[in-house]
Structure formats: C-alpha cells, structure tokens
Image: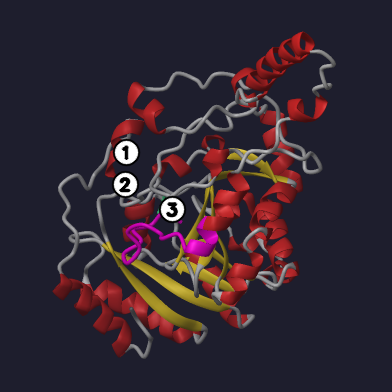
C-alpha cells in the first residue's frame, strides 16, 4: 500500500542488512580467470595476457545491455530515475535468474516504470494464475515502519484503487514492476533470515496492492514462514476474499488501510467501494488474525472528526485490532504524479498540524484502541 508512511520518511538500512545486501551485490569471479591457459614462453605469455584482458572486459559488460529490449518511450526525467530495462522473456519459476541490482531500492519512493514491458501478456496471465512469478517494484531492507521490528519489504506492482494521496502511483501498473520468480524472491529474502530473527522483525509485502497478485504473494509468504520469518501484508483489503482460510494462516499480521468512512466518501477518495474492505476486516476478526489499522490523515480530505470516529468505532468493535497508525499526509510522492502525467488533486495540500494529528489519535484512543 503506497500510503503516506508518516513516521517513515526513509526506511533505514541496518548495518547488518546493509552488509548482507552489499555482499549480495559483489561481483562473481570472472570466468576468464579460470579458463585462461598458462603461456609457455614470454611472448606467448604476453599474448595470452592480452587475450585474457579482452575476454575479461567483455565479461564485465552488463548482460542486460544485450539481452534486454530498450525501454519504451521514457521521458528524459523518468529515464534518470528508472531502473535498467526488463528482460525480454518472462521469468519461469524454476529458472535461476540474477536479481537485478536495481531491485534493492533505498526506499519505495524511487520512481520505477516499464520494468516488465518485455513480458508477453499471456505470460503475465499465466503468472497470475499460477503464482509462480510476480512483479515487484523493489525490495527494501531495514524498514522499521512496515510491521513489528526491522523488516525486509517487497513492494508489489498493480493496484486498482486510485487514492488521491497515493505516494507511489508508479506501482499502479503491474508491468511497471520487475518480473521475478517466487524461488528467486524467496532466495533473496533468505539472505536476511537470521538478521530478521535477531532484530525481532520479519517480512512484509506491500505495494501497490499485494492481493492483485495473491497467488504469488501467498507462495512467497509460505516460503517465508517455512524459514521461520514473521509475515505481514499491507493491503487495502479489497481482494481479501481471494484468500482462503489456509492462506490466512500464512499471514501473521495484516496492516489494513481504512481510508475514510461512508460509501460515497470512500468512492470519491479511492475510486472503489468500501464494503469489500470492511468484509475482509470482519473475516480477519472472525478468524482471530491480527490487524494493524493504517489511517492517512489528510487536511480537508480525511480529517473530519465524525468520520474518524466511525472508523474508530468499527475498528474497536472488531476485537482483533492491535494498534492504529495515524499517518500524516506528505508530499514525497508528488513528483511521481507529475512525471507520470497524472492529474494530482493535492498539489497545495499541506501536511496536517501536530494538533490535528493529536486530535485524530485521541479519537482512536477514546474508542479503546492503541494509536500511534
Ligand atoms: S492507490 Fe493503491 S497503492 Fe496507492 S494508496 Fe491507494 S490502495 Fe495504496
């Protein structure tokens, strides 16, 4: 969920996670160094050295440069921020694929587009059907705002909502993400498994809307659980009915976005009906699955005290809401709307005042909820 992550600003990298990430990026030894034969004479040795050097230089060239299609028309601005082009063919679940350096991002606020353009539509569909492959905007490490403890976060692409304050509109389109197999994503996560346990953290899948790719997400969460890693999804809940009861067992925590109250208000803010989200929340409560509610406070949009009161009343009535996070609106994603050429309605909206945030927190606390 590309919501305003109030206390987040920028996810920090822990030194441990950073070291691991760094080591994962280190270059493999060049094949040429293994394959060069020893020269018998001085001249032969020189000649062999020259050949080795040429071969080695060739092997250092990025593989994607020749294997991938160039990205589709990209504005000069987005070209500066976008990651390297996508592979021309779909990634199959069993194929070992090198993780693109760019998949590990410093923060989800990085703009990424067209990474999956080369994947044929039929492959996208079969990936969604099987869940063996998914599309990710990025991986971030060291987040302390996407669930308990320190987290690795996989940001999925694809979202059918159009929240006016969304700070990651580049995640709306699935093909903006990088195609990656479950096996490769799980392998990447596995590098952090021990650190995550030590830091009482875990793995979070956010987006975009993760449940747009629910089969991929469930497979990845199942892999995480097998590694003993705590699992969380950040979701708007709209596709909650796609998850079976068994799927829910793979999710330790749902961070559920409750945006506003009332059918019309909700449709105006998000473009979608609120009822599926509420139904998912009730189902999670019935199955005793933990929820953290996320509520984005936007001046003149979501700061009506009566409406906040109704959200608080609903959340408190569920009985499984461990905490509420009030996220002050910010403008960190504004540049993305501009670069994508999407009309942005909150151009002049300021972040809420401290008093306004405190008022919202008080409403949730008065309903008996822990709110931060
Ligand atoms: S549009 Fe989608 S990704 Fe953006 S905040 Fe809304 S639910 Fe989240």
Say which residue label 2 marks. Answer: 333
Is mark 2 in CB contact (under 8 Å) with mark 1? yes
The tag on residue 337 is 1
Q: Is residue 4 magenta?
A: yes
Quadrant of the rendered structure where residue 44 is? top right
- Give the structural element (helix, strand or loop) at label 3: loop
Is mark 1 in CB contact (under 8 Å) with mark 3? no
Q: Residues within 10 Å of mark 2 (few under 14, many from 20)?
A: many
The relative height of residue 243 versus residue 138 in the rendered view (above or below) is below
Q: Is residue 345 magenta?
A: no
Q: Nearer the viewer, residue 311 or 2?
A: 2
Q: Nearer the viewer, residue 65 or 134?
A: 65
Q: Main secondary structure of the magenta part?
A: loop
Residue 60 as seen in the image, left or right of residue 158? right
Q: Residue at x 56, y 39 (%)?
A: 101
On the image, the x and y values in percent for residue 60 come to: 62, 25
Quadrant of the rendered structure where residue 81 is? top left
- Give the structural element (helix, strand or loop) at label 1: helix
The relative height of residue 196 versus residue 366 in the rendered view (above or below) is above
Separation (CA) of disc 2 from disc 3: 21 Å
Mark 2 beta carbon near ligand 1 (under 8 Å): no
Mark 1 and mark 3 lie on one chain; the one further toward the N terminus is 3
Separation (CA) of disc 2 from disc 1: 7 Å
The tag on residue 27 is none
Say which residue label 3 marks. Answer: 272
Q: Which residues are magenta?
A: 1-18
Quadrant for the C terminus in the image: bottom left
Mark 2 and mark 3 lie on one chain; the one further toward the N terminus is 3
């Amino acid at each position: 969920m590309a919501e305003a992550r109030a206390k987040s600003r920028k996810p920090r990298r822990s030194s441990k996670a950073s070291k691991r990430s760094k080591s994962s990026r280190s270059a493999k030894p060049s094949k040429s160094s293994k394959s060069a034969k020893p020269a018998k004479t001085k001249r032969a040795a020189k000649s062999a050295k020259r050949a080795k050097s040429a071969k080695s230089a060739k092997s250092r060239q990025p593989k994607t440069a020749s294997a991938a299609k160039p990205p589709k028309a990209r504005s000069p601005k987005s070209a500066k921020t976008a990651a390297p082009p996508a592979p021309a063919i779909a990634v199959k679940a069993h194929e070992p694929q090198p993780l693109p350096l760019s998949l590990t991002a410093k923060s989800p606020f990085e703009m990424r587009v067209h990474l999956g353009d080369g994947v044929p539509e039929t492959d996208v569909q079969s990936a969604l059907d099987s869940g063996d492959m998914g599309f990710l905007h990025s991986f971030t490490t060291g987040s302390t705002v996407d669930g308990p403890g320190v987290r690795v976060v996989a940001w999925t692409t694809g979202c059918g909502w159009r929240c006016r304050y969304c700070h990651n509109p580049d995640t709306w389109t699935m093909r903006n993400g990088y195609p990656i197999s479950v096996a490769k994503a799980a392998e990447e996560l596995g590098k952090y498994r021990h650190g995550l346990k030590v830091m009482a953290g875990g793995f979070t899948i956010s987006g975009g809307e993760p449940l747009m790719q629910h089969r991929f997400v469930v497979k990845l969460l199942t892999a995480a659980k097998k590694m003993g890693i705590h699992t969380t999804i950040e979701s708007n809940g709209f596709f909650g009915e796609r998850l079976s009861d068994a799927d829910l067992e793979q999710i330790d925590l749902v961070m559920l976005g409750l945006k506003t109250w009332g059918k019309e208000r909700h449709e105006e803010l998000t473009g979608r009906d609120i009822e599926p989200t509420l139904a998912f929340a009730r189902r999670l409560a019935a199955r005793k699955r933990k929820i953290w509610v996320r509520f984005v406070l936007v001046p003149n949009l979501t700061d009506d005290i009566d409406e906040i009161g109704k959200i608080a009343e609903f959340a408190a009535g569920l009985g499984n809401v461990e905490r509420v996070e009030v996220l002050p609106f910010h403008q960190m994603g504004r540049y993305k709307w501009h670069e994508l050429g999407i009309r942005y309605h909150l151009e002049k909206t300021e972040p809420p005042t401290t008093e306004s945030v405190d008022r919202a927190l008080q409403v949730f606390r008065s309903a008996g909820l822990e709110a931060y």
